[in-house]
Amino acid sequence: MKRVLSDRRSVLRGLGLGMAAPALASVRAAQGAVLPQPQRVSRTDVVVVGTGLAGLAAAIEAASRGAKVVVIEKMPEDKFGGNTAIAGGSMIVPRDNSSGAKADFVDDLFLKTLRRGNTELFRVLADHVLEDIEWLKGHGAEFVGPNQVAPYRLQTMQIAPRQAVGMPKFMATLKETVARKGGSIVYSTKAKQLIIDDHGRVAGVRALDAEGLRDFMAGAVVLATGGYASNRELLEGFVDPNSDAMVVRGVKWATGDGLVMAREAGAGISNMGGLMSLHIAAVSPDDPSHGVPDRGLPFCLAVNIEGKRFVDEARGYVVHGKATLKQPGQVCALVFDEQIATEARVKTSMESYRRLKLPILEAPTLVGLAEKMKMPAEQFEATVRSYNDAVHDQRALSAVPPKSALAFKLDHPKYYAFYPLVPGITMTFGGLTINQAAQVTEPDGRVIGGLLAAGEIAGALYHDDYIGGGMLANCLVMGRQAGRTATGGG
Ligand SMILES: Cc1cc2nc3c(=O)[nH]c(=O)nc-3n(C[C@H](O)[C@H](O)[C@H](O)COP(=O)(O)OP(=O)(O)OC[C@H]3O[C@@H](n4cnc5c(N)ncnc54)[C@H](O)[C@@H]3O)c2cc1C
């Protein structure tokens, strides 16, 4: 892939990108006459919509290659960064740069996504994510790792110093790098429509700020507006009529704006149907973003409010989150005992709960714990007893449902519970169809000229489940790729 751009204008012109602003008479907003044509018009090489990792990676790459870049963000400056700003900060990587490690990376994701993930884009991630993390480090970002994530062969890097804690500094570094490279960010400016020229190319974005409408004309537009977890209409229409049974773990303004705008311009979408298109985790209703005892989950017993088990806890937090959605009252508990509490991953979940000042229930007996959770104590005790009887060699295969790994008896008082836990949407998997160059395509595969998309909005990489760290890796690699394509790079 070509990575160096010596003369921005000549290359952009060669691609028909840098001539950015066609005559106004020949352009039209994608929604026809809904919005009037504004008086204020500015011209630039690349407009990026959204200040999450995908948008800022695109902006930094494009600006580093000599392009004039404007990023527009609908939120005020103190709320920039979308879901990236509140993320845990882990990113998946192949264990090294060998072709075998990359093939394992792709295969791990393929298997985790029920063989329906976007293998083409998994390969792009495998090829670039290690190099792109080095690129971020070169701009001042700090990472720790790699860490093993059993049972997978891929690994994760973590934004330093640890989960969630490093995000403010990381976001500040990205923002500062955009400025250092000559790009600018305009806040409180909401993209409303794509502008299309008379060749059917996207020629800019019509946006709304405090003074009214404003057109940003550009040679290329990068949509990086994130997912649609906070758009009830999209969720109920595409995913599930009962979507309101879930809390939203991310920012309330992840409303799929870019998806809606691009569809109006003819873009294709994929993987938007049913619960397979969502990442769901069981979370504390008091802190849906960070109150998630996912590390400890495989060691615990998940019980519903009737005191019954309902899922193989070893299958991971997304399977558990989706199963919780189907339980009475959409609520569950994760219970464990004093011995299980000494497991490192359970300790991590307990420490994070305490740091967040979330309660962990405890009692000297199972009956006492059931009473605290207002669960039928007899049923709860019977559930634990029959599960204990089934435990052999860290498995409980004859339990109902079976537990396939990390099964330990609960018989060391005292007893603990993370309770209540409710299903929360972490992210949406469906989105705009794009090719490996991050160009948005129509349902028939035709590229929409001038329009790129990256991050949670695009690619539909994951299906049903994903491996933690898979979305930020996608934002980084495809965001940077969008910046490269926008400036004529391969
Ligand atoms: C609690 C939590 C923890 C997570 N932890 C991880 C993790 O550790 N690893 C991982 O891989 N993934 C994680 N994820 C998922 C990941 O954070 C997101 O998928 C990712 O950050 C999305 O990045 P993005 O750049 O696509 O969009 P975002 O970061 O959401 O940014 C989109 C931006 O676009 C702006 N915008 C939207 N519409 C418009 C408009 N019309 N005009 C202008 N601006 C607009 C938004 O305001 C926002 O700033 C987590 C998610 C949550 C909720």
Image (cartoon, rainbow, N blue to C red):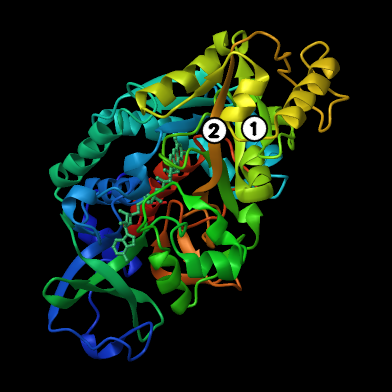
Q: Residue at x 54, y 28 (%)?
A: 418
In the rendering, at what x and y percent does residue 10 appear? 24, 61
- Say which element carries label 2: strand
Question: Helix or strand or loop: what does disc 1 sit on?
Answer: loop
Residue 374 coordinates in the image, percent (x, y)? 60, 35
Real-space Cα separation, disc 2 to disc 1, in angstroms: 18 Å
Q: Which residue is mark 1?
A: 316
- Please name the residue shown 59% across and 13% down the image: 364
Q: From the Cβ of disc 2, is ligand 1 less than 8 Å away?
A: no
Q: In the picture shown, does residue 100 fall above or below 175?
A: above
On the rendered structure, is 26 left or right of 471? left
Residue occupied by mark 2: 419
Classify 29 as above or below 225.
Answer: below
- Disc 2 packing (10 Å; few <14; some 14–19; many ≥20): many
In this orientation, does residue 426 appear? Answer: yes
What type is the residue that disc 2 sits on? Tyr
Front residue of this view, candidates 152 and 445: 152
Q: Amino acid at mark 1?
A: Gly
Q: Position of residue 30 (x, y in %)?
A: 38, 82
Residue 304 placement: quadrant: top right
Instruction: Specify whether residue 151 is in view.
Output: no
| Foreground disc of the pair 2, 1 | 2
**Picture quadrant of residue 272:** bottom right
* The residue at label 1 has a CB less than 8 Å from ligand 1: no
Which residue occupies 66% across, 8% down? 412
Q: Earlier in the sequence, mark 2 or mark 1?
A: 1
The answer to which of 6 and 178 lies nearer the viewer is: 178
Tell me if residue 153 comes above or below residue 189 in the rendering: above
